[in-house]
Image: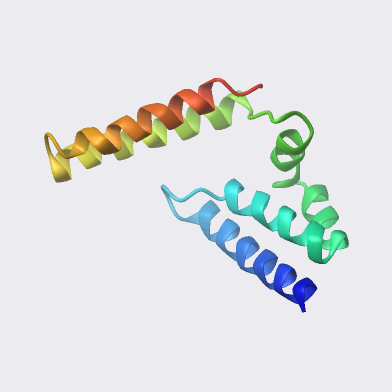
Amino acid sequence: MARRLWIAAGVVCVGLGWLGLLVPMMPGTVFFLGAVYCFMRGNPERAERLLAHPVIGPPLRDWRERRAISRRAKASAILTLAVSGAVTWWAVGYPWALLGIGCIVCVSAWIATRNE
C-alpha cells in the first residue's frame, strides 16, 4: 500500500512539474525533485527515468549529487522573485508587503549561496 502511495505522489509531482514549466511564476524543478524522492521509495526505475531525461535530468542530477543550481537557474529564480516582490508591493502596499518581501529576500539569499 505504501509503495502505491509513493508512486501516486510521484505522478502528481511530475504533473505539477510539467505544469510549472509552462506556467509563469510556478516552479517546475521543485516538483520534479519531489517526484524523484517519491519514486525512489515507490519505483526506483521511474526515478532513474526522470534523472536520465534530456531536459529535466541535468538540474535534478546537479542538485542530487552536489546540491548545485546553475547560474542561469539562479538568475531566473531571483529575477522571478524580484518581480513577484514588486507585484506584492503594488497589490498589498506598505506595511503588509514587507513580510512577503522579507521572505523573498531570505529565499533569494539562500538560492544565491548554493553551489554552481
Q: Which quarter of the figure is the C terminus placed in?
A: top right
Residue 59: image x %, image y %? 69, 38
Q: Residue furthest bottom?
A: 1
The quadrant where residue 73 appears: top right
Residue visible at 38% across and 35% down?
A: 81
Residue 29: image x %, image y %? 60, 47
Which color scheme is applied?
rainbow
Q: Residue furthest right?
A: 45
Q: Residue furthest left?
A: 94
Residue visible at 65% across and 62% down?
A: 14
Camera-side residue: 100 or 46? 100
Residue 107: image x %, image y %? 44, 32
33 with respect to 99 (left or right): right
2 with respect to 101 (left or right): right
30 with respect to 41 (left or right): left
Residue 71: image x %, image y %? 59, 23
How many numbered circles does the render carry? 0
The quadrant where residue 9 appears: bottom right
Q: Which quarter of the figure is the N terminus placed in?
A: bottom right
Residue visible at 72% across and 60% down?
A: 38
34 with respect to 16 (left or right): right
The quadrant where residue 12 appears: bottom right
Residue visible at 56% across and 50% down?
A: 28
